[in-house]
Every structure is written in structure tokens, then in C-alpha cells.
Amino acid sequence: MSQKTFFITGANSGFGFAIAAAASSQGHKVIGSVRSKQSQVTFEERLPMARSILCDVTEFDRIADVVRQTEEDHGPVDVLINNAGYGHEGILEESPLEEMRRQFDVNVFGAVAVAKAFLPRFRQRRSGFIVNVTSMGGMITMPGIAYYCGSKFALQGISEVMRAEMAPFGVRVTALCPGSFRTDWAGRSMVRTERSIADYDALFDPIRQARQSKSGKQLGDPDKLAAAVLELIESDAPPPQLLLGSDALGLVSDRIERLKQEMEAWKSVTVSTDG
């Protein structure tokens, strides 16, 4: 694999750190974006060969300058790993709109802002690879994570359009759709809305309890995800989306089958509106 320069958002933990570590170990140049001075120090202590920059993806007006300075200091970036994000858990009726706004600011607007800062550079160089980290939650849903799924569905759709628009310029785009992995997503990183409506107890309390009890014990290995990402980067024909994890494969496959059945059941109504 030829040496590449990676720009990874949310690089200090979870998937971001795993990908940074794997890329660095294979001799790639890694620039990790983090949100605090302490995270910057910790990141560079853990990965001495990597470099870090301070960048909060919700500070939209700063991102273009951060990317410009990054390429001035480290040369052209070849691979953008749009990883920064977090999970919100809460019943829709109970969850304030402000929590939804924050979820979309980070998971959607932040990711798009970073991508948009790189798009003209990749387009002009006629090369580049963008990996937008979505989730199986961008293709399926479940009670209690409406804001999270909404944000990932949005990024999933945007990624497909981005892929189509950038393809003529030799720029590749893939949405990475992980299932459940051993990261802090369901632990300290998750924002949880407090419960307030007893009617939802029977539906949601077991889901929340199960998610908390499984945190840190999920089947998915972040290091194996990182290895899969490096394999993806080298592909001559990367897919529009790449599911990672047997749970993601099973749940998304089931959703596709149900969708087919729903379409068939309502086919006569669907076609009745023509003409």
C-alpha cells in the first residue's frame, strides 16, 4: 500500500483512534482532529508518529481554515475519515428539540462541513477518498434513538449524492455502516434524555437496560474495523456503503426483506396514482 495522508475527525477514541493507529502502524501519515488540548496531548502520547489538530466540527466557520492550514503544514490529504459523532438515546416525545439540533450539528452538519472543505481540493487534484462513518442506524431504526437514526439516515443519503457528484473527478466516497462495536458509543459518550412519561416504560426501559448491560461486550472489534477500512481504501471499486458486523448484516437484510414485502402488499395502491 502506497503511503497516504489521512485526516481523521474524532480521532482520540473509538473508531477514529482505531483507524488512526492502524494507518500509522502501516506507515501512513495521520492527522487526527480532536476537540481539546488534553485530548491532543493524549492522542500524540498514544500515537507518537501521528499529528493532531484542534477542531470542533460544529465550529463551522473555522473548518475551511483548519483544512487549509493542515495541507500547508502536512501536504495534500488523500483520505478523509469523517468519524466525529455521538449517540443520543431518548424517547421522541420526551426528548427536547435542542438535543436533536445538537445531534444533527455534530453528526450531519459537522460531517458535511468537513467534507465540503475537502471537496474542492480533491476535485482539483482529481483524487481523494471520503469515508463518512454512518451506522447500521442509518439503514434501520429502533425505539429510543430517533435523533441518532435520523442523523445517520441523513448522512447516508448525503453520502450517496456526494459519491455521484464526485465520481467524475476520480474522488471516491463510501458510507461506513457499523453495527455494534466495543466503543464508548453506548457508554460514556452517549447522551441520554431523562425518562418522564410512564406510558413508555414497558417499551423502552428494557431496551435502555439491555444497551447499557452490553456496553463494552459487543461482538464488533474496533481494530478489525480499522483493518477493514484500510482494505476499503485500497479497493479499485469501493461500494457506496459498507456494512461492518454480522449484526448489521442480519438486521439490514431483514429490513430489506420487510421492505420488499411491504412494497408488494401495497403495489396496487402504489401504481394506482399514475396517469
Image (cartoon, rainbow, N blue to C red):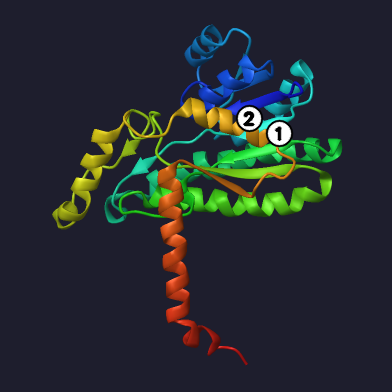
Query: Do the numbered discs 2 and 1 sit on residues whose CB atoms are within 8 Å?
Result: yes
- 105 vs 250: above or below: above
For the point 28% across and 39% down, the residue is: 211
Image spot of residue 206 (x, y percent): 19, 46
How many marks the image carries: the answer is: 2
Residue under label 2: 230
Position of the N terminus by quadrant: top right
Q: Amino acid at mark 2?
A: Leu
Mark number, residue 51: none
Image spot of residue 124 (x, y percent): 85, 38
Q: Is residue 19 left or right of residue 128?
A: left
Image spot of residue 41 (x, y percent): 52, 9
Give the Cα separation between the discs numbered 2 and 1.
7 Å
- 70 vs 159: above or below: above
Q: Amino acid at mark 1?
A: Glu
Disc 1 secondary structure class: loop
